[in-house]
Image (cartoon, helix red, strand yellow):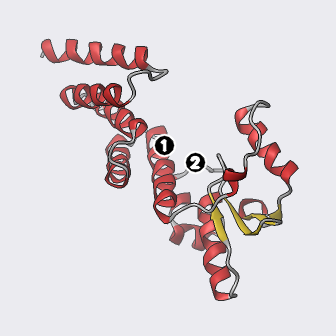
Amino acid sequence: MDDYYNPKNNFLNNVIEQKVGIPITLSIIYSEIGKFLNLDLKIVGFPSHVIVKYDEETILDPFNHGNLLSLDNLQEILHSNYGDDVEVLPEYLNEITTEKILIRMLRNLKNSYMESYAYEIAIKCNKMILSLSPDSPDEVRDLGIIENKLLHYDKAVKLLNHYLELEPNANDADFILKLIKEAREKITHR
């Protein structure tokens, strides 16, 4: 796929029309078609690559033409995205809930819009995620960062402080504290 990060790849109507999509949208389509065929295909939120499972031995990758995936294939996906230290765990093959599918799709959209500097639309996606998962630290942080990019410093400071309350030992705490300091300076120099 040439334009993997295009926001349109998250919209099922576009994926059906274009006959191309990303793993999560193709997995949804596979699952829905499976229902018509009386196949209980489960959408699996495998790290970094959504897949479909029929049973423990039949795992499909809709993104790669529905290829069957072995444990070695799954391990390869993890290694290519997270490095050699990550191993396949049984829970990585659990069915994902509808809510988590929505959150994952909204995160994809948010990231796509961020990449294209469409911050206002990214904020809408972020707020939808927070409506499903109100105290998600990463989403609170990301919303604060986006508000900061839009020069909404008061909102940014409030959100970034809330993030640090939710995650006092966050790995990016120094970066967030720097953003808060810079935003406060901009507020006082208005």
Numbered marks: total: 2
Q: Quadrant of the N terminus?
A: bottom right
Asked whether 65 or 163 is in front, the reply is 163
Report x, y in % for residue 186. Answer: 20, 15
Residue 5 - label: 2
Report x, y in % for residue 164. Answer: 34, 25
Q: Residue at x 32, y 49 (%)?
A: 127
Q: In this view, does 55 lie to the left or right of 98?
A: right
* Residue type beneath disc 2: Tyr
Asked whether 69 or 17 is in front, the reply is 69
Q: Nearer the viewer, mark 1 or mark 2?
A: 1
Residue 111 - label: 1
Asked whether 7 or 155 is in front, the reply is 155
As helix, strand or loop, the secondary structure at mark 2 comes to loop
Report x, y in % for residue 109. Answer: 47, 51
Examine the rendered structure and indicate whether residue 138 appears above or below residue 45: above
- Residue 181 visible at all: yes
Q: Are marks 1 and 2 in contact (CB under 8 Å)?
A: yes
Q: In which quarter of the image is the C terminus?
A: top left
Q: Residue at x 29, y 18 (%)?
A: 180
